Amino acid sequence: MWVLGASWKPRRILIAYFKQHYYLFTRALFPIYTRARPDSGGFLEMLTTISRVSTLLIGVALLLVGHGLHLAVVPLKAQLFGWSDIHIGWLGSLYFVGFILGCFSVPALNSMAIQLT
């Protein structure tokens, strides 16, 4: 049976000290990740921040829904049109090849557009 001996007292003092100074330790080590103070009105600030970026969030949500529907509906329509499974697979693969090529070609197009203005 384990008995609390003399070694428990320093641990208890250390734990009490850490509980007292926990906020200061976390503020010094992780200034971004600490909780906001209660007097900052965090809920109202959160609502104003969300309202400022709400159009951006709605736009991203619509793009995600459209992309998901595209990936689900196009193979189903191709199957209804009587395409073979190989052609449907090539369609899905070439979609992502075009996506990757677009990621590489759009920066060049943007730099040309910036030079024209």
Image: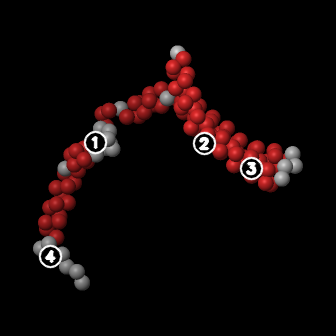
Residue 19 lies, in percent from the top left, at 22, 54
Residue at mark 1 to residue at mark 2: CA–CA distance: 38 Å
Inter-mark Cα distance, 4 to 3: 72 Å
- Is 86 positioned to the left or the right of 23 in the image? right
Where 86 falls versus 5 (above or below)?
Answer: above
Question: Are discs 1 and 2 less than 8 Å apart at CB?
Answer: no
Q: Earlier in the sequence, mark 2 or mark 4?
A: 4
Q: Position of residue 84 (x, y in %)?
A: 83, 53
Q: Amino acid at mark 1?
A: Pro
Label 2, on which residue? 100
Dot 4 alpha-carbon crowd within 10 angstroms: few under 14, some 14 to 19, many 20 or more:
few
Query: Closer to the observer: label 1 or label 4?
Result: 1
Residue 114 relative to residue 74: left or right: left
Report helix, strand or loop for mark 1. loop
Which residue bears the numbered disc 1?
31
Q: Give 52 or 9, whichever is nearer the viewer.
A: 52
Q: Earlier in the sequence, mark 4 or mark 3?
A: 4
Q: Residue 63 appears in which quarter of the rendering?
A: top right
Q: Label 2 to label 4, Cα distance in Å?
A: 65 Å
**How many badges with numbers are in the image?**
4
Task: Look at mark 3 in the image and give the residue it sits on.
Answer: 90
Q: Earlier in the sequence, mark 2 or mark 3?
A: 3
Q: CA distance from mark 1 to mark 4?
A: 38 Å
What amino acid is found at the position of numbered circle 4 in the picture? Gly
Residue farthest along the top direction in this orientation? 117
Q: How is the image coloured?
A: secondary structure
Q: Are marks 2 and 3 in contact (CB under 8 Å)?
A: no
Q: Which mark is residue 5?
A: 4
Q: Earlier in the sequence, mark 1 or mark 2?
A: 1
Sequence-wise, the earlier of marks 1 and 3 is 1
